């Protein structure tokens, strides 16, 4: 999947599934979250990036939105694996 970001506060993720190309529009917080994850950042760091992108006025609504975002992204096949840190 590739992330695209223009000058406006809306980004998009473009991905391929079963030989078809799809585009999913993203808000600035969604873009910040997926962008951080795609660069190998931890979920904690990615969530902080999303909160910064949401801004102070909108950050309170973020927790309620996260489940829906991850559900959509998982259903669309944007995640292939989860890497857990090694114990010890």
Image: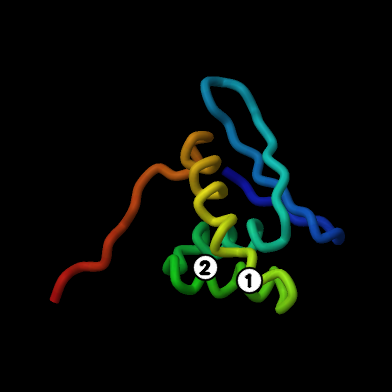
Nearer the N terminus, badge 2 or badge 1?
A: 2
The quadrant in which residue 34 appears is: bottom right
88 on left or right of 27: left
Q: Position of residue 20 (x, y in %)?
A: 61, 22
Name the one closer to the observer, 45 or 19: 45
Give the residue at mark 2.
Answer: 46
The residue at 40%/42% (across/down) is 80
30 on left or right of 67: right
The residue at 54%/63% (across/down) is 63
Give the residue at mark 1.
Answer: 60
For the residues carrying marks 2 and 1, which lies nearer the camera in this image? 1
The residue at 47%/41% (across/down) is 74
Q: Position of residue 55 (x, y in %)?
A: 72, 75
Name the one closer to the observer, 71 or 14: 71
Name the one closer to the observer, 37 or 66: 66
Residue closest to the far left = 88
Residue closest to the far right = 8
Give the SS element for disc 2.
Answer: helix
């Amino acid at each position: 999947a590739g992330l695209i970001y223009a000058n406006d506060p809306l980004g998009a993720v473009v991905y391929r599934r079963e030989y078809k190309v799809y585009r999913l529009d993203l808000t600035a917080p969604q873009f910040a979250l997926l962008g951080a994850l795609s660069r190998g950042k931890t979920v904690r760091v990615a969530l902080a990036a999303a909160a910064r992108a949401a801004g102070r006025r909108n950050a309170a609504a973020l927790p309620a939105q996260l489940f829906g975002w991850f559900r959509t992204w998982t259903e669309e096949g944007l995640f292939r694996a989860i890497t857990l840190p090694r114990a010890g």
